[in-house]
């Protein structure tokens, strides 16, 4: 039988051996230890203009979401909160194409701190993680526990009635698009029907989505305009899809990080030449939605 060794919790603040740099080394070597997924290190001690240095900048290689991580030995305090929010704000303004989240890591996170941070959560994406350090025999281990998670915003179709009043086909033909671009949307929707024959179009005020068995199922959405259709497959941003679109030269708008979808301008000419590509994107989006 393996012998039991009781762990002894130690504090890193003013510790003669273990320092904040030591913690940074551990996280930089294996960012997954924070429990935020398989992240990669983008930068360390990142210089912020007139605002000090960001401890760690991590990124999700699949969604490209970035995490601005600030470490605090001992108990967290007001300056820790301010630094974390300030660095998050600087980074999101410098790189608005990515989704950003502030991450506060401290050895001691008090209830007062959680109350203050929870006031920001929702307006500012914040995650709080408590760090504990234990000696186990001749070894030292770090344990990270998430005590405040980022407030997740619902998808468009999860609160459809609240943000998009239903309309009809005539509204899109007259007010938003034209009969010609709505007809182009119909041809694109036929590609949806090939793999998902029970889907139907649902005309909303801000977009045309999909409905299946009476429920919204918007793995793709359409927005007919006057000269084109804005096609929006819900897919995590990836090098594979970026390369597909770049290789064929189709015009795209900025990736919608908040909603998690590509935004592709499609004309009649685009559809005739790249029909197979659009069908592939639709199938990818449907497979991703179905898990």
Image (cartoon, helix red, strand yellow):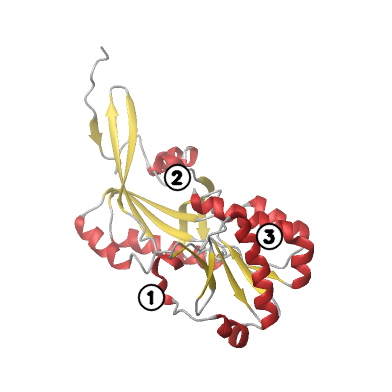
Q: Position of residue 259 (x, y in %)?
A: 50, 64
The residue indicated by pointer 2 is 37
Query: How much space separates mark 1 and mark 3, taking CA atoms?
Result: 30 Å
Helix or strand or loop: what does disc 3 sit on? helix
Q: Would you identify the image quadrant in which residue 180 lies?
A: bottom right
Residue lying farthest to the bottom in this orientation: 174
Task: Determine the CA span between mark 3 and mark 2.
Answer: 31 Å
Residue 33 visible in image = yes
Mark 3: give few (<14), some (14-19) or many (20+) Cα within 10 Å: many
> Which tag, 1 or 3, sits closer to the chain's start?
1
Q: Which residue is located at x 34 percent, y 58 percent? A: 80
Q: Which residue is mark 1?
A: 162
Q: Nearer the viewer, residue 48 or 248?
A: 248
Q: Secondary structure at mark 1?
A: helix
Q: Nearer the viewer, residue 27 or 261?
A: 261
On the image, numbered disc 3 is attached to which residue?
A: 278
């Amino acid at each position: 039988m393996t012998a039991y060794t009781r762990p002894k919790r130690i504090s890193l603040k003013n510790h003669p051996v273990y320092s904040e740099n030591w913690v940074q080394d551990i996280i930089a070597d294996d960012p997954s230890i924070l429990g935020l997924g398989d992240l990669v290190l983008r930068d360390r001690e990142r210089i912020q203009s007139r605002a000090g240095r960001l401890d760690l900048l991590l990124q999700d290689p699949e969604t490209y979401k970035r995490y601005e991580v600030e470490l605090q030995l001992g108990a967290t305090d007001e300056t820790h909160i301010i630094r974390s929010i300030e660095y998050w704000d600087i980074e999101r303004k410098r790189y608005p194409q990515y989704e950003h989240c502030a991450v506060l890591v401290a050895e001691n996170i008090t209830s007062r701190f959680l109350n203050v941070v929870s006031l920001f959560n929702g307006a500012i994406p914040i995650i709080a993680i408590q760090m504990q350090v234990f000696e186990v025999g001749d070894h030292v281990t770090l344990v990270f526990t998430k005590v405040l998670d980022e407030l997740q915003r619902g998808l468009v179709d999860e609160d459809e009635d609240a943000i998009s009043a239903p309309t009809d086909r005539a509204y899109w033909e007259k007010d938003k698009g034209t009969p010609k671009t709505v007809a182009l949307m119909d041809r694109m929707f036929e590609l949806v029907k090939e793999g998902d024959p029970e889907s139907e179009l649902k005309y909303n005020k801000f977009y045309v989505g999909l409905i299946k068995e009476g429920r919204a199922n918007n793995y793709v959405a359409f927005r007919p305009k006057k000269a084109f259709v804005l096609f929006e497959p819900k897919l995590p941003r990836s090098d594979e899809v970026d390369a597909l679109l770049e290789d064929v030269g189709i015009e795209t708008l900025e990736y919608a990080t908040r909603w998690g979808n590509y935004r592709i301008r499609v004309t009649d000419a685009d559809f005739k030449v790249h029909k197979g590509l659009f069908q592939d994107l639709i199938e990818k989006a449907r497979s991703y939605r179905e898990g």
